[in-house]
Amino acid sequence: MKRILTLTQFTPAEAESITGVSTMTQRDWRRRGVLTKRDEGHARYDLFDMGGMMATKLLSDRGVPLLEAADVAEWCGMGIGYRALLWNNAYEGDHERTNEARGLPNMLLAQNADMFEALRKAANIARVELPDNLEESHRWGDKAEWLAHQVYRDRFKTGLIPGQLFIWWANGQHLFHESFDKARDEMTSGDPRLAGPALVLDFESLASTLLTKAGRAFVHVEFPELPENPDA
């Protein structure tokens, strides 16, 4: 199956409106190596670049030295960008036909029919109202996960995805984790990492912010071998 996944490129002015990092600051950061220079000519950024830019600003604005913030920014951008790719409006083009291109629609419906029926019965017993688009949402979740992994691997050549949270402890140590409470529970009360406030970046929230402020898709999806008419 041939697929073409093209990351949308944003101008410095657009990146400023999305991330809050001014074009002047962007130029300074490119000069200092805080932002990566990808190609000759005009600067352009994709969603991962802007996720890293946003993380750098958030950390440095709260007292983390700029170069130290920049050291972890790419991984933060990877975590933010991946989670943005799980949303339907992150895509344009043939994204709704992803499972069709994979030859999966009928298979998915058959496999999940019993599951949806069981959910309806359980909801009826518990007198809980299920959303009308339950099946549609589930099928999009499968498409989103596949698309997100394809885009992510194409961009970074790895399947390693940072945890949902980035935590910068009071003593300057930091880590990626799925839960702040669990990360905290792994430490004793006298741990130097707890001797002051911690900074926490929630990648899902930041991904939502990126999507909202961008106002357009991050990836254009094409499956050239599919017929132009979906009903064909």
Image (cartoon, rainbow, N blue to C red):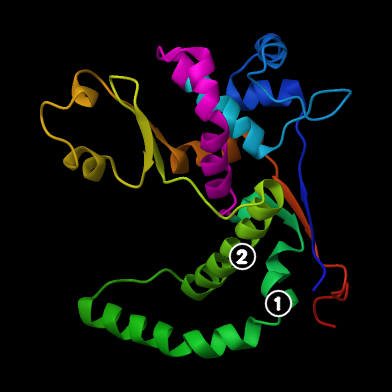
Report the side of 36 relative to 201 (left or right): right
Residue 146 lies, in percent from the top left, at: 61, 65
Q: Nearer the viewer, residue 128 or 100?
A: 100
Residue 13's image quarter? top right
Image coordinates of residue 209 in percent, x first then y, are: 53, 35
Say which mark, if any, is on residue 209.
none
Query: In the rendered structure, which disc, 2 or 1, sits on the residue that comes first in sequence?
Result: 1
- The kind of secondary structure element at disc 1 is helix
Task: Work out whether residue 209 can be spotted.
Answer: no
**Range of magenta residues:** 59-87
14, above or below 78, in the image: above
159 part of magenta stretch: no
Residue 224: x and y, percent? 87, 68
Give the label on residue 146, or none: 2
Q: Nearest the camera: 201 or 141? A: 201
Q: Which residue is mark 1?
A: 102
Quadrant occupied by the C terminus: bottom right
In the figure, 153 relative to 35: above or below?
A: below
Who's the residue at 68% across and 25% down the image? Answer: 15
Q: Amino acid at mark 2?
A: Trp
Vertical arrangement, residue 217 with respect to residue 199, above or below: below
Q: Amino acid under label 1?
A: Arg
Q: Residue at x 61, y 52 (%)?
A: 158
